[in-house]
Image (tube, rainbow, N blue to C red):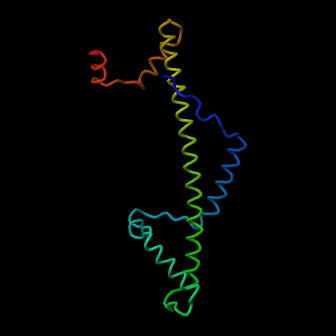
Amino acid sequence: MSTLKNLNSTHLSAEQIETINTNLGSLETTLSMIVSNLTGDERRKYGSISEQNKLLVNKVNDYAINQPALKSPDVDWDEFTKDFNSRTVLEGLIARLENLLTGINNAKTLHDYDNYQAALDDYAYANYKTGTSSPGFEAKQKELKQFFIRTKKADENQTSE
């Protein structure tokens, strides 16, 4: 059984990495005024409104726009509208960023896999070269061997077969 290799051979150039870092820095700077660091207690206290409650907010917003005579005088409607619009924009940004994050994580996973398979190939080569008494490979093989520690049960199963 052969192992698939080089599942992701697309790499970012130094210029692309610099552009990404510059743009991320700009995004972080732009968003810094609205980014909030909530404690665990604050997150539990304020939480995320449920889908049902989002429907309530949306319906209240619809009434505020379409039948303004029915609006409560106790609500700061300018602030409500600003919160509603910010919330809508942020939801869109979150969705876009989550899509990017998923794609980036997938690309990283493929690079991790490629690196691991290459490392296994290199370890197998070091084992082979150690068997041929080639200079330097025994020390390398011993160093790498620590990452392949077997449990007693696995060793017993292999000797009983």
> Whole-percent x and y of residue 145?
43, 21
Q: Quadrant of residue 158?
A: top left
- Residue, far front: 1
- Quadrant that contains the C terminus: top left
Q: Is residue 141 above or below residue 19?
A: above
Q: Quadrant of residue 77?
A: bottom right
Left-right relation of 51 to 6: left
Q: Nearer the viewer, residue 131 or 52?
A: 52
Task: Residue at 73% x, 43% y: name it.
Answer: 15
> Whole-percent x and y of residue 104?
58, 46
Task: Residue at 54% x, 45% y: name it.
Answer: 105
- Residue, far top: 133
How many discs mark residues in the rendered view?
A: 0
> Whole-percent x and y of residue 83?
55, 76
Task: Residue at 59% x, 74% y: name it.
Answer: 85
Left-right relation of 79 to 131: right
Left-right relation of 34 to 124: right
- Residue, far right: 15
Q: Quadrant of residue 157?
A: top left
Q: Is residue 83 above or below residue 136?
A: below
Q: Is residue 117 above or below residue 100?
A: above
Q: Nearer the viewer, residue 78 or 72?
A: 72
Task: Residue at 55% x, 30% y: name it.
Answer: 115
> Whole-percent x and y of residue 98?
55, 55
Q: Is residue 88 above or below residue 127?
A: below
